[in-house]
Image (cartoon, rainbow, N blue to C red):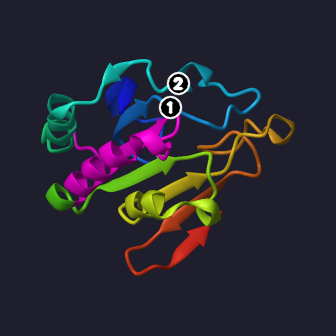
Amino acid sequence: MNYLQYYPIDVVNGEGTRCTLFVSGCEHFCKGCHNATTWDASKGTPFDQAMEDRIIADLGDARIKRDGLSLSGGDPLFPGNLSGMLKLVKRVKTEYPEKNIWLWTGYTLEELSTAQQDVVQYIDVLIDGRFELDKRDLSLPWRGSINQRIIYLSQQGNSKIH
């Protein structure tokens, strides 16, 4: 897994103050995508143990409280990203169970593979669906087109979709 950008302090990608990681790799190729430079999985910097440790340290930094971690891209659920994503989200939930994790994906919840579902079980808020240029709406919070959903997931298996 490669990443293109990491923001240790972010107030745009999800509720509250967050750490945000933009990974490489996407197979949706949505027309009008504002992150088209992230499609190529070979671009960016390899996500290594040092980067994982930095995210964990930033989440625990008492000087600036972070509400959680946001994962975007590219697509964090791109097949080539799944093992790295699973390792990261498991560690975040183990070390910081009170922190929430938001994840943006072009896949819908209903079309996730078993391996993708393994990652999503650790996610608190899933923004799903491909960006559709003809359904673009810049007034929507945290998504670009009206077909994309904000799904608040719970550990009990219940979800709330907006």
Above or below: residue 4 compared with residue 47 = above
Residue 124 or 25: which is nearer the viewer?
Answer: 25
**SS for dot 1:** loop
- Left or right: where does residue 37 sit relative to residue 41? right
**Closest to the observer: 46 or 91?**
46
Quarter of the image where one finds residue 110: bottom right
Query: Vertical placement of 51 versus 59: above or below?
Result: above
Numbered range of the magenta stretch: 64-93
Q: Residues within 10 Å of mark 1 (few under 14, many from 20)?
A: many
Quadrant position of residue 29: top right
Magenta highlight on residue 74: yes
Q: Which mark is residue 110?
A: none
For mark 1, what is the residue? 25
Measuring 34% from the left and 26% from the top, which residue is drawn there? 6
Q: How busy is the neighbourhood of tag 2: few (under 14 within 10 Å), some, or many (20 plus)?
A: many
**Dots 2, 1 in contact, CB < 8 A:** yes
Task: Judge whether 161 appears above or below 45 on screen.
Answer: below
Q: Amino acid at mark 2?
A: Thr
Question: Picture coordinates of residue 58 (x, y %)?
Answer: 19, 36
- Residue 160 pos. (x, y %): 57, 71
What residue is shown at x 23% (from left), y 43% (from top)?
65
- Residue 123 drawn in magenta: no
Closer to viewer: mark 2 or mark 1:
1
8 up-or-down from 122: above or below:
above
The residue singled out by tag 2 in the image is 38
The residue under label 1 is which amino acid type?
Gly
Res 5 quadrant in image: top left
Q: Give the alpha-carbon distance from disc 2 to disc 1, as whole Å.
A: 6 Å
In what quadrant of the picture does the C terminus appear?
bottom right
